[in-house]
Amino acid sequence: MSTPAQDYSLAELMIVAGAEAFRHDGEVLATGIGLIPRLAASLAMTTFNPDMMMTDSEAYLLSEPNPVSGRKPGQVQKQETWMGFSRIFDNVWSGKRHAMVGPTQIDRFGQANISALGDDYSKPKVQMLGVRGFPGNSISHANSFFVPTHNTRVFVERECDVVASIGYNPERLPKGYQLNDIDIRLVITDLGVMNWQGPNHMLQLVSLHPGITVEQVVENTGFEIHIPANVPVTVAPTEEQLAVIQQLDPLNFRAKQLKDNPPGDRS
């Protein structure tokens, strides 16, 4: 029987919550963009979804995930086959991929922005990455969102300054697409877990992290979200899960991903 941990960090809570996004995926290519999403996908592959595929972030498909810290030069990785760029795109376009990404802005439709901030795209206030692979990825396969700081600068009141990925906005659907074709899974933030399964594809609260209130989530979200009658507390990591996370990140890089490395239970 799994034993809930008594002492864990918020980063570790978010890793465990993020792993749940991949629970029922089966044999798909999991891509976690950033350290916490990478650890979330690695935990899922190590514990409850061994069919999941993962690359070494270069060109090999792994039979077990690489650690994110503490690997020695020349340390052997358990690779199954070559996963060149063309094969990555085969997975993307066939829908056999699930990425956990970190948008800078998210609007009420689930549309996301990683490109630029400001009303005038020709003269942005902040230039970021550009849309990169967001448009093609979001129309081709499942995506989840990781948000380290849940606030109204991320969850914006208006539409995103640049719409870089598809969402549940009927006005922006590509030709031939329906709302039910859009696949945005979980949203993992430092306040709780959400999804877009509310009425009319509203963002809805799935769970609150220990010590966080509904009011905090509402105050830090720039648009209306659906609050079910009963919102559970996000399940704490087990001792077994923490042991796996420690093996994947022995140098504790995860402690540096959130400001001040807060505890998982902020009661």
Image (tube, rainbow, N blue to C red):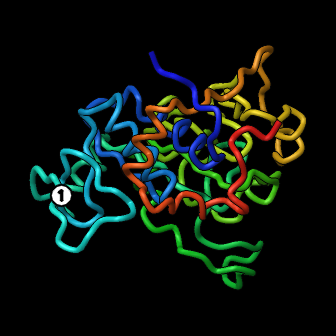
The structure residue drawn at horizontal position 65% and vertical position 65%, both measured from the top left corner, is 162
Left or right of 44: which side holds 169? right
Residue shown at 79% from the left, 41% from the top: 266
Location of residue 23 by image quarter: top left
**Position of 176 relative to 249 (above/below):** above
Amino acid type indicated by mark 1: Gln
Q: Nearer the viewer, residue 95 or 256?
A: 256
Residue 223 is situated, as x and y percent measured from the top left of the image, at 82, 43
Horizontal placement of 27 versus 180: left or right? left
Picture coordinates of residue 191, whole percent (x, y)? 74, 42
Q: 248 and 42: which one is in front? A: 248
Which residue in the structure is indicated by mark 1? Answer: 77
Farthest residue in the bottom direction?
123
Q: How many marks?
A: 1
SS at circle 1 = loop
Residue farthest along the left direction in this orientation: 81
- For the C terminus, the quadrant is top right
Image quarter (top left, top right, bottom left or bottom right) of the N terminus:
top left
Q: Is residue 127 above or below residue 9?
A: below
Quadrant in which residue 47 is drawn = top left
Q: What residue sits 47% from the left and 57% below the top? A: 135
Q: Is residue 212 above or below residue 249?
A: above
x then y, percent, for residue 140 = 38, 45
Who is closer to the viewer here, 231 or 130?
231
Q: Counting other residues with Cα less than 10 Å from the Cα at mark 1, is it few (<14), some (14-19), or many (20 or more)? A: some
Q: Give me the residue at 73% from left, 57% from top.
A: 154
Instruction: Left or right? Give the position of 167 relative to 46.
Output: right
Whether residue 194 is visible, yes or no, is: yes
Where's residue 211, x and y in %? 81, 35
Residue 141 seen in render: no
